[in-house]
Image (cartoon, rainbow, N blue to C red):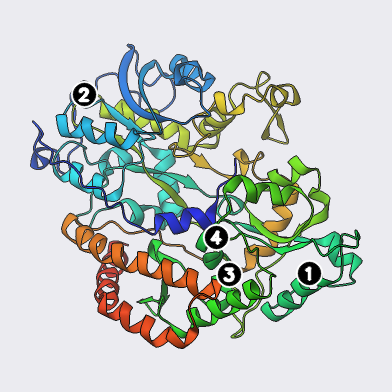
Amino acid sequence: MKRNWGTVLLSTLVISSMTLSACSSDTSSKENEGKTPTDGTKGVAAAGFPIVKEPLKLKMFTRIAPTNGPFKDMPVFQDYEKMSNVQVEFIEAPTDGFNEKKNLLFASNELPDVMYRSGLTQLEAIRYGTGGQLIPLEKLIEAYAPNLKKLMETYPEIRSAITTPEGHIYALPGIVSVNSARTDKKWINQAWLKKLNLKEPETTDELYEVLKAFRDKDPNGNGKQDELPMTARNGLSIVPIMAGSFGLDFQLGYNINLENDKVNIWMGSDRNKELLMYLNKLYAEKLLDPELFTQKEAQYLTKQGTGNTGFFFDQTNNPMLDGKVQDQYIGIAPPKGPHGDRLQLASPVPRDFGAFAITSVNKNPEATMRWVDYFFSDEGSTMLRFGRQGENYELKNGIPYYTDAFLATGNQSKITPYAGGGAPHLISEKVASYINPPQVQEAQKKLDPFMPKIRYAAPMFDEQTAQQINILRNDIDKYYEEQSTKFIAGALSFDKWAEFQNTLKKMKIDELQKLYQVAYDNLKGQK
């Protein structure tokens, strides 16, 4: 399944601004704080299966995506119940209206045992955790989650992304260790390059010249100037896609560069001005899709499959497969910018924050932690994503692939909660065949040398600081998006850049930067 990383990053740059209902709980945070509950834990196996000797029932509240079938019909949960002896009753709520139903559970204190694939925000995790409705998980991870513990040791950015300033973990994320699932590839039409005798562009200047040739020299050979040189997903997704060529990073889930352990929010910087001016030049000369700010996702995907697009961005090659033009395209490295920068955008290893949490009514948290930990292994993730061996998938060199017969049914999204995103599990090279075929792997190799060593996810803030940041960013982010769109589209002159900078300062962007600096300092201190 595709992940729209440009869109995902931009959308996750905004902290949820929903007003959460005040919640009450029969269990105080002080009673739960730092403890591993022990009620009903007899018979929990330290390793192996079954997890418990006597059947155990858990209620899990979950979001069901439009593409999914009922969770009870999914082979992963049917087979895992037999393995683990843990019977799960899923309380399913559709994507539309899901947040309202989730908030009602906490407001009424009518809690399930587990919040599964429930997309808890950081603010929700902190509020419900400190309020006692979610229990701390750090000691449970230490004792009952060897797979997750190993991943957290391998990728320290996981711990920093889910640990509160007080040192507690109230929710688990999804984890993506395969690089190709963390990036949008830079797909260029190699058939057009060959026809026009052009080489792969290595710099932003060379990319500009290639795009002009795509526009003017009839690479599709139909005698019409109908080629689309470059397109991207709707809106400002083009900014993070091209930002690395101008030395701009997206650390801590925001428009942030980390320079000698100093947080620098770069929205009003000269480098960002250079980026927006470059994009404005492409847009003004019709090298960048004129429908960039109006097209829907379906339109964008269709343009990838026509073969009449010169340069675009996507995690996988699925849209090209649909259009049967995949051989026309290859991935290229990030073009070097005017100052020599070639940084590749990548989402963090910890993804889908709040994918799994244990509530205070759960009498079997140890068994529950063991239950979810299996899906942070390659074996468990294979079961979750691919279903049953032979029936749904087969192994080739140890890697699972859907069988042709099963692919022909079109039921992939019906057998796994992975479809629709947000499930707590591991996406590694060993379970990513569907999104990481050879063509994608080759494209990723072009990006690997320019990947950041660590991409820090949005840090956990205490509730008061989270509210402060939320207030500041509501105004700053809206203003930045509106003005950047105008700069790119030519509706706002760059003569207004100083005014733009001054407005950001009036909106207290310096104060926002200080709050992120404190969070980063705390993060470094946790290591």
The numbered mark, 3 or 2, whose residue comes first in the sequence reads 3
In the image, what residue occupies the spot 26% across and 60% down? Answer: 470
- Sequence-wise, the earlier of marks 3 and 1 is 1
Q: N-terminal of the two: label 3 or label 4?
A: 3
The tag earlier along the polypeptide, 2 or 1, is: 1
Real-space Cα distance between discs 1 and 4? 20 Å
Callout 1 environment at 10 Å: few (<14), some (14 to 19), or many (20+)? many
| Residue receiving disc 2 | 363
Residue beneath disc 3: 242
Tell me the residue that label 4 is attached to: 293
Query: Percent from the top left, x then y, of residue 38?
Result: 19, 28
Residue 92: image location, x then y, percent: 37, 24
Amino acid type at mark 2: Lys
- Give x and y (percent) for residue 34: 17, 44
Q: Specify the quadrant of the image occupied by residue 516.
A: bottom left
Residue hosting label 1:
215
Separation (CA) of disc 3 from disc 1: 20 Å
Residue that appears at 10% across and 36% down: 24
Q: Quadrant of the N terminus?
A: top right
Locate the C terminus by quadrant.
Answer: bottom left
